[in-house]
């Protein structure tokens, strides 16, 4: 068995229900690892704690993380397993900004998880955007609902699910502002022993796309 951590809750892509992990990403990663010869056990972690858990040896793999340049020095990635998207979440009565453009929010506050994919990209490309770094999706969205931030930058479908579950007065974006490929990740010292077999097991699967609509192979 191989120990696999995953971001929780990350509904509808991944979540824990009782003692069982569910979601389209969980099922895809489970199939890949079984085919690679390592039946997985799944372990839920918060966004803040999952990378430290991998570094400490509590788990062997992270089921999915966005492949981003700033993670190249801390995580070793498999081939992509899913193409997802990041979107902007604005209040229903938004007076500034646009859900279609990060540039429209220059000079305003945008909340995003500090462990998420956008924080370093926004800092590098939109230095006049005022970032509010949070520990979770819920915290970022509640800051928007309270008027403390003009927008939240989050995964499109996971953010939409949080808005619906929390009944927040936030508009549901229709499209991502940026595509992000997600892959299985591990520590560099495990990469040579794990990733070749994992990558070979990924090859027969078509890349899942979860951007504008339901997940589908493309």
Image (cartoon, grey):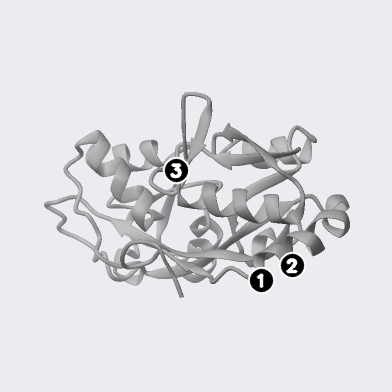
Badge number at residue 203: 1
First of labels 3, 2 by sequence position = 3
Q: For the residue carrying disc 2, how many other residues have a C-alpha within 10 Å: few (<14), some (14-19), or many (20+)?
A: some
Residue hosting label 2: 200
Residue mark closest to the camera, 3 vs 2: 2
Residue 11 placement, left or right of 16: left
- Label 3 residue SS: loop
Residue 193 placement, left or right of 124: right
The structure residue drawn at horizontal position 58% and vertical position 34%, both measured from the top left corner, is: 45
Residue hosting label 3: 10
Residue 37 placement, left or right of 84: right
Which quadrant of the rendered structure holds the N terminus?
Answer: top right
**Quarter location, residue 44:** top right
Q: Is residue 111 above or below residue 76?
A: above
Q: For the residue carrying disc 1, how many other residues have a C-alpha within 10 Å: few (<14), some (14-19), or many (20+)?
A: few
x and y percent of residue 179 in the render?
Answer: 45, 70
Q: Is residue 209 above or below residue 156?
A: below
First of labels 1, 3 by sequence position = 3
Residue mark closest to the camera, 1 vs 3: 1
**Quarter location, residue 9:** top left
Q: Is residue 95 visible?
A: yes
Q: Nearer the viewer, residue 73 or 58?
A: 58
- Label 1 residue SS: loop
Q: Nearer the viewer, residue 81 or 122?
A: 81
Verify CB contact (< 8 Å) between mark 2 and mark 1.
yes
x and y percent of residue 30 in the render?
Answer: 61, 48
């Amino acid at each position: 068995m191989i120990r696999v951590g995953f971001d929780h809750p990350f509904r509808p892509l991944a979540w824990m229900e009782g003692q069982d992990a569910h979601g389209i990403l969980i099922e895809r990663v489970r199939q890949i690892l079984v085919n690679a010869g390592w039946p997985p056990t799944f372990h839920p972690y918060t966004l803040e704690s999952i990378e430290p858990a991998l570094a400490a040896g509590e788990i062997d793999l992270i089921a999915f993380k966005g492949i981003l340049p700033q993670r190249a020095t801390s995580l070793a990635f498999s081939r992509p397993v899913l193409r997802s998207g990041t979107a902007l979440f604005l209040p229903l009565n938004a007076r500034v900004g646009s859900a279609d453009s990060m540039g429209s929010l220059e000079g305003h506050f945008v909340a995003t998880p500090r462990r998420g994919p956008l924080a370093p990209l926004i800092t590098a490309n939109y230095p006049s955007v005022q970032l509010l770094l949070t520990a979770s999706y819920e915290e970022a969205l509640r800051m928007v609902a309270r008027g403390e931030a003009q927008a939240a930058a989050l995964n499109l479908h996971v953010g939409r699910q949080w808005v619906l579950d929390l009944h927040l007065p936030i508009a549901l974006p229709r499209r991502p502002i940026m595509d992000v490929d997600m892959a299985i990740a591990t520590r560099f010292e495990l990469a040579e022993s794990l990733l070749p077999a994992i990558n070979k097991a990924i090859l027969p699967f078509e890349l899942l796309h979860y951007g504008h609509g339901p997940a589908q192979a493309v």
